[in-house]
Amino acid sequence: MKRLLLLVSLTLLLALAACGGAQPSGQELLPTSETVIGELATATPILEAPAEGETGDVVGGNIIPTLAGTTWQWVDTTTPTETIVAVDPARYTITFNEDGTANITADCNSVSANYTTDETGTLTIMPGMSTAVGCPADTQDQLFLSALASATNFFAIDTGNDLYIDLAADAGTMRLQPAAAAGLESAAPTGLTGTTWEWVSVIDPMGQTASADPTRYTITFNEDSTANITADCNTVIAQYVTDGNTLMIMPGASTLVACEPGSQDQLFLSSLSSAASYTVEDGELFVALDAEAGTILFRPAGTAAGGEDAGLEAAPTLAGTTWQWTESATANTATAVAEPARYAVVFNEDGTLAITADCNSMTGAYVAGEDGTLTMTLGASTLMACPEDSQATEFMAALAAAATYSFDGADLVIGQAADAGTLRFQSATAAADTEAGGAGEPTEMTLTGNAWQWVETTTPTETTTVADPTRYTITFNEDGTAAIGADCNQVTATYTVADSALTIVPGASTLALCPEDSQAEPFVLGLSAAAVYFFQDGHLFIDQFASSGTMKFAPVAAAGEEAGEETAEEPGKGETTAPAGGLVGPLWQLTGITQTGGNITINDPTRYTISFNADGTANLVTDCNVGGATYTTSEGNLLTITPGMSTMAFCGVGSFDQIFLGGLTNAQGYRLEEGNLLIDMLYESGTLVFMPAP
């Protein structure tokens, strides 16, 4: 009935639109019977009725459209009493991704989200982390986000492109339209992608303003319509759309470091936000601004302003190898490097550099020509104080002066400008092979397989020491999830790694009130700003964005050994959060529940899982929800599990989520039989049966 009323309302609205009317200003709420919705440019319909026999018919010819692959703009929301019109649909968008995540633009902020749906049209949207920019006075961001959060189902009408989302409790229906229908269809950009562009200058009616240092202001356009921006000391994630030579750039989430006085970061970002069109001429990028306000000039990273573009394609023989510095030579002398493993450079295929300069990590860019020319531009670096014998300063200065490269057998030789000298490098693999059984060969360390305790954080201005590292831990699991112990609270997280790059996204958390001396907030914020990780002297170091700091972690096992007798269990208790063998490691999938009233078989075990971490935390998937838990084990394979913070989506009729959670809450003991895990519940009420995930 609700949809029938909606269709009648839309028919009336279209009839009224033919009579003319004024578009409302601000966030004005207009009665349905008097609202005139401004016409939006339409595109070729992208929604098609389902083929015969396919699921899709709902009511009166409605269909269930494909959500993913389209950026949807909010047009209006019809409630039982009024229609709320979006002031500017382009400012309110949602893109559903194939992996169950969604990207939301809520006016001036970017929001990450998760969503679930099925072939019947049910829809749940769970907004997550968001930027916190103050939007204009006419913003409708909270109205838009709250409506998405109350979504219950979606549908389309086979006569148009519009997407309709019904809200909970019959509160109304949102109408969205493909971004293409408003002239924002993103065409394949010509010449934009594949290059890191450095800002050279901006020309406006007042004159020309030159960039003080082009290497500090860059933008890289990615094929997926996202862009990575470096605005002096901050890193910004953006979205962009193109159509022919038109260009729109929408800066989003950003680090919030205060840059040095005289920074041009705000001028750079505001200019990008005003982009209207672009051209690429003679290897340089020109971006014209709205209302003929000016033009921004860019050059490819690593080239001189106005010079020829040597291209950023990495020489195949350079990339793919970790090169360790072994020797410096001048016309008269040759000096061997005492510990080559402390000084290394990796040339990536995309023209970027990853540099290890003793105790610091550094990014950069390079241009390698087929004629053997080489230019290296050093970027952001951590700022740790290295040992007295460090050669880091000499190493970085020599790299910055690179002019040529060649190969001497398997070694890489980098020549410096003005024939100042050469650097010789050996691949890390070859270096390991030639150590000939050298004493003290380091054990390879990995993120997973250990719980890490936070020891300290070093910033450019101070070092913060953790009062009690045992209260702040993180465990990286093999499945891309992480368990965080933030003082008295447990936090679930996800993480991704690519070479030495690291991203950590904290999720659901318990909300206990921690002691006054708690350092939980800076701990979690520090993890959220992770950019790069490395190992040194048995410790894990996590560098943060824009050289804002470095977090140091010690492995829990090592910390326990240093604590000695203090970590021994109290007499008579025998309880520990590091359980007996078998629990930790696998991702356990629920296959069935045996109980006196009848057994339950789980048809899809992947929807009900638990993974036990070494630090006494666990990660849960309970059908359509994710959450965390804590657990303890004691002698005799006794087991207690306490579920913690979780998402609260309704998983539908027939879900076993509550039965699963209840069973875990009533856990009494566990057994490992033939590779499977059996968790017995209190009062002999039943057993949860798990198998390890393939």
Image (cartoon, rainbow, N blue to C red):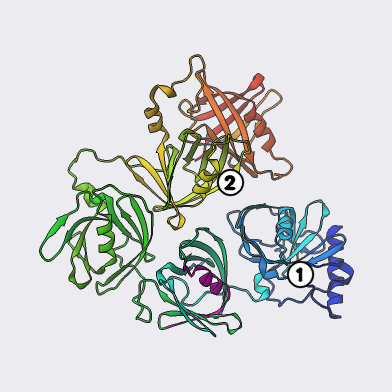
First to last magenta residue range? 262-281
Q: Residues within 10 Å of mark 2 (few under 14, many from 20)?
A: many
Q: Is residue 610 visible?
A: no
Return the x and y of residue 202 as percentages of the image width and height: 49, 79
Q: Quadrant of the N terminus?
A: bottom right
Label 1 vs 2, first from the N-terminus: 1
Q: Is residue 26 left or right of residue 388?
A: right
Disc 2 target residue: 507
Instruction: Say if 329 sits above or below 183 in the image.
Output: above
Quote the CA–CA distance across marks 1 and 2: 34 Å
Instruction: Determine the image quadrant of residue 4.
Output: bottom right
Q: Secondary structure at mark 2?
A: strand
For discs 1 and 2, the disc positioned in front in the rendered view = 1
Q: Which residue lies at the image location 87% right of the left edge and 67% below the top edge? A: 31
- Is residue 12 within the magenta segment? no
Q: Is residue 502 visible?
A: yes
Badge number at residue 26: 1
